[in-house]
Amino acid sequence: MADLSELELQNLRHLMGGYDTTHCKLKEYASCAKDSQVKQFFEKGAQSAVDNKQTLMGFLQ
């Protein structure tokens, strides 16, 4: 892996924080949803945010 610049590390941190926020919000939306399809939609989005964060964390290893 090539060395990341300070700016690249800051960008990764910013993106990962955004995915954390997205995950939390979508989980909350899912918990409030009455319709099962809407609930599933938000849960899938929340899982996608976790997966994307994990992918970004791979750049730090």
Image (tube, rainbow, N blue to C red):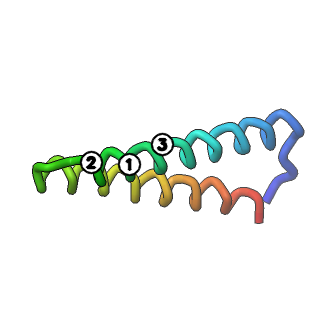
Which image quadrant: the N terminus?
Answer: bottom right
SS assignment at label 3: helix
Q: Is residue 38 left or right of residue 12?
A: left
User: x, y percentage for residue 41?
Assistant: 23, 50
Which image quadrant: the C terminus?
Answer: bottom right
Disc 3 versus disc 2: nearer the observer: 2
Give how far apart the Cα atoms at labels 3 and 2 are.
15 Å
3 or 2: tag closer to the N-terminus? 3
Q: Which residue is mark 1?
A: 28
Instruction: Check disc 3 and give the amino acid type.
Output: Thr
Q: Which residue is mark 2?
A: 32
Q: Residue at x 29, y 51 (%)?
A: 30
Q: Residue at x 10, y 50 (%)?
A: 35
Dividing the picture into quadrants, the one containing residue 57 is bottom right
Dividing the picture into quadrants, the one containing residue 48 is bottom left
1 or 3: tag closer to the N-terminus? 3
Q: Which residue is mark 3?
A: 22
Q: Residue at x 73, y 36 (%)?
A: 11
Instruction: Check disc 2 and give the amino acid type.
Output: Cys
Picture layout, residue 8 above or below residue 31: above
User: x, y percentage for residue 38?
Assistant: 17, 47
Q: Are marks 2 and 1 in contact (CB under 8 Å)?
A: yes
Give how far apart the Cα atoms at labels 2 and 1 are.
6 Å
